[in-house]
Image: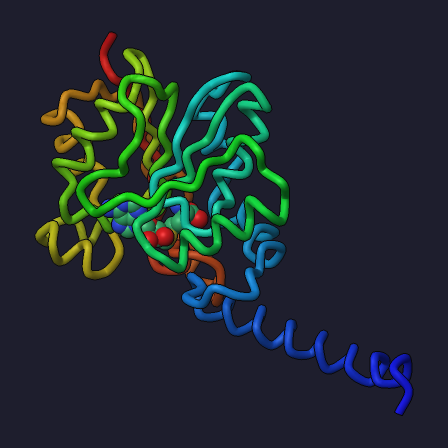
């Protein structure tokens, strides 16, 4: 069989495999495998179920800022932050999971993100440069912080005075009387608990929108929003 004819036969097979892989990754929620990365499918729905434009606005980024996306996952927010801080700025796209670090490297390569540095942290230290960040985003990740005290301490150290910490996460009012550990098990965290944790760590709370988005139980795929309301908190490192 000629090479050209074989290519035409293989093309639909390759497209089919890509579609199956993409659908499988998206319908199971957060993708757990490293390839292929369903960037498009992950991104298109976000405005509806996470209001990323408003999340990014809350960071109040300027050109040239150094910033971090802690628990960056596949790097959706890190990429938008990179766009907002521009070529003279820098984004630390940090995560602790190897599969996320793979996603982040793939995204950096695919979109040629020269102002994004992929950083591997640990569950008690995001390993960010001290006293240098204008803003840090922790989106849908705080509910993973079992060691929240050292994490908050390290993020505070990394922020410049006046720097902002924006946290978005999920919680249903009915679940808020549960212990911290029990809430973490269902991937939720009460914003009032987080407010107190931030206060004890030395942050000043600027505002908390609760709910930032009401639960959308009709969603069968997407993100945590099918199970819980989303809240958004903004805090600063005191000057
Ligand atoms: C649900 S994903 C959210 C990803 C991304 N923020 C987003 O909204 O698309 C949570 C991410 O947090 C990461 N993670 C969990 N604990 C962490 C920690 N202590 N520090 C940094 N990342 C963490 C996980 O590996 C995972 O990639």
Quadrant assignment, res 168: top left
- Residue 87 to residue 146: above or below: above
- Residue 14 lies, in percent from the top left, at 71, 77
- Residue 171 to residue 84: above or below: below
Please give the name of the residue rendered at 41% of the width and 34% of the height, measured from the top-left corner. 92
Please give the name of the residue rendered at 19% of the width and 32% of the height, measured from the top-left corner. 152
- Residue 22 lies, in percent from the top left, at 58, 69
Please give the name of the residue rendered at 43% of the width and 22% of the height, measured from the top-left corner. 66
How many marks on residues?
A: 0
**The N terminus is located in which quarter?**
bottom right
Please give the name of the residue rendered at 83% of the width and 79% of the height, measured from the top-left corner. 7
Q: Is residue 207 left or right of residue 59?
A: left
Q: Is residue 205 visible?
A: yes
- Residue 33 lies, in percent from the top left, at 45, 67
Q: Is residue 171 visible?
A: no
- Residue 10 to residue 192: above or below: below
Q: Is residue 68 left or right of residue 125?
A: right
- Residue 138 lies, in percent from the top left, at 34, 38
Quadrant assignment, res 129: top left
Quadrant assignment, res 225: bottom left
Residue, far bottom:
1
Residue, far top:
239
Q: Nearer the viewer, residue 221 or 236?
A: 236
């Amino acid at each position: 069989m000629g090479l050209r004819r074989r290519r035409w036969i293989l093309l639909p097979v390759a497209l089919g495999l890509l579609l199956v892989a993409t659908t499988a990754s998206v319908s199971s929620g957060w993708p757990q495998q490293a390839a292929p990365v369903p960037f498009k499918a992950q991104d298109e729905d976000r405005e509806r179920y996470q209001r990323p434009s408003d999340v990014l606005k809350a960071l109040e980024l300027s050109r040239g800022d150094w910033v971090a996306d802690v628990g960056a996952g596949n790097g959706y927010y890190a990429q938008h932050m990179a766009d907002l801080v521009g070529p003279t700025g820098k984004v630390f796209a940090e995560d602790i999971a190897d599969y996320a670090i793979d996603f982040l490297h793939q995204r950096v390569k695919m979109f040629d993100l020269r102002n994004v540095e992929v950083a591997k942290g640990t569950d008690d230290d995001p390993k960010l440069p001290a006293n240098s960040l204008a803003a840090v985003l922790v989106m849908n990740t705080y509910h993973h912080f079992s060691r929240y005290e050292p994490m908050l301490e390290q993020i505070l150290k990394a922020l410049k005075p006046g720097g902002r910490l924006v946290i978005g996460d999920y919680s249903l009012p009915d679940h808020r009387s549960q212990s911290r550990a029990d809430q973490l098990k269902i991937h939720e965290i009460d914003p009032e608990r987080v407010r107190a944790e931030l206060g004890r760590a030395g942050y000043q709370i600027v505002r908390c929108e609760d709910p930032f988005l009401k639960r959308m139980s009709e969603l069968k795929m997407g993100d945590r929003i099918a199970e819980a309301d989303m809240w958004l908190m903004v805090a600063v490192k005191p000057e």
